[in-house]
Image (cartoon, helix red, strand yellow):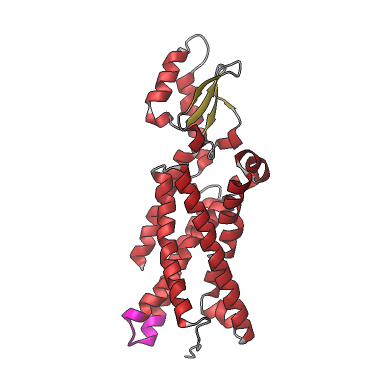
Amino acid sequence: MQFHVHKDHFPAWLENIIIILILAVVVHTVLEDLALIYEWKHSTVVGLTIAGFLFDFLFTAEFVARSIISHKRGQLRLYIQYHRGWIDFLSSIPLLLFVSGPAVLVLMIGHEEAGATLGFLSVLKTAKAIRVTRILRLIRIVKIFGRIQNTDSIMTNRHVGVISTISVVTLVIVLVLAQLLPFIRMGDPHDYLKMRKQELASLLGGGEGAPSKNWILTQIRSNPENRDVVLLFDAKGKEIYRSPNYETLRWKLYNHGKKMAISEKYSVVLSHHIADGLHARENMIVFFSILGLI
């Protein structure tokens, strides 16, 4: 069996920094999901978003640099095919272009303008699916740990790397398919919106038997399940309720903050932050499953 001899692209100190960055982005990925689950302050989420952009930019620069160096050595195909260059690509450029890049652009141009400019991104399931590829960066750590644990056996190192890679990539493919295929639903915010509209229609009611305005406002204010109600309007379009967390939730509105009719008498503006938290929980389960495989 022929083994491909591979020389590191960068000096040892720079390779070590990249290893530290990989470990840091693993922690960052966990923090991003925790921020959604526990509804951290908007300023914290903004900081994590900017950090995610910086990570994706650095890993994109790493991939480009490794590709250029490999090309100069006449080993570009070797790098892409045998030394996980394809993983470096999947976990860098698509994330920068479709996830962290647009997210930072939204922060720069403001919420209202972002809704008009980048609204199409919020309905692209591929954007959510691509985010899952952050987990692929763990495969490089698998390779490092495999060398440490099995230094006496080159064959064992190769088998550990191949098995771990197949396992992790298979999980990622399943998650991507779960986001793209219409008959597989995992943490879909549109499904959650449909459910919430039905629940609110039951709460708000209509016709002669509808509950009073004061009763409805009491239910919205006191029931934690209704914390996704950001604005409530009566039949004349008058605002009768505004969430105390409006400044935080206005970045996470369904339908770019447009009113949605729930009954004959009421319309609402809803936040998708609860659905985001449910999706983040599923991401965490997959994340720690991959750590278990490693």
Q: Residue at x 43, y 31 (%)?
A: 227
Where is residue 69 drawn, in percent x and y? 60, 81
Closer to the camera in the image, 102 or 74? 102
Q: Is residue 1 left or right of residue 80?
A: left
Closer to the camera in the image, 274 or 196? 274
Q: Residue furthest right?
A: 117
Residue 12 appears in the picture as rendered: yes
Q: Residue at x 45, y 29 (%)?
A: 244
Q: Is residue 186 left or right of residue 116?
A: left
Q: Residue at x 43, y 24 (%)?
A: 220
Where is residue 101 drawn, in percent x and y? 59, 55
Is 85 in the magenta?
no
Dominant secondary structure, magenta: helix
Q: Is residue 46 above or below residue 140?
A: above
Closer to the camera in the image, 62 or 81? 62
Q: Which corner quadrant holds the C terminus?
A: bottom left
Residue 123 appears in the picture as rendered: no
Q: Quadrant of residue 27?
A: bottom left
Magenta highlight range: 148-158
Q: Quadrant of residue 291?
A: bottom left
Q: Residue at x 41, y 81 (%)?
A: 158
Q: Is residue 171 above or below residue 35?
A: below
Where is residue 221 drawn, in percent x and y? 41, 24
Q: Is residue 97 above or below residue 46?
A: below
Where is residue 18 drawn, in percent x and y? 47, 72
Question: How many numbered marks, from 0 up?
Answer: 0
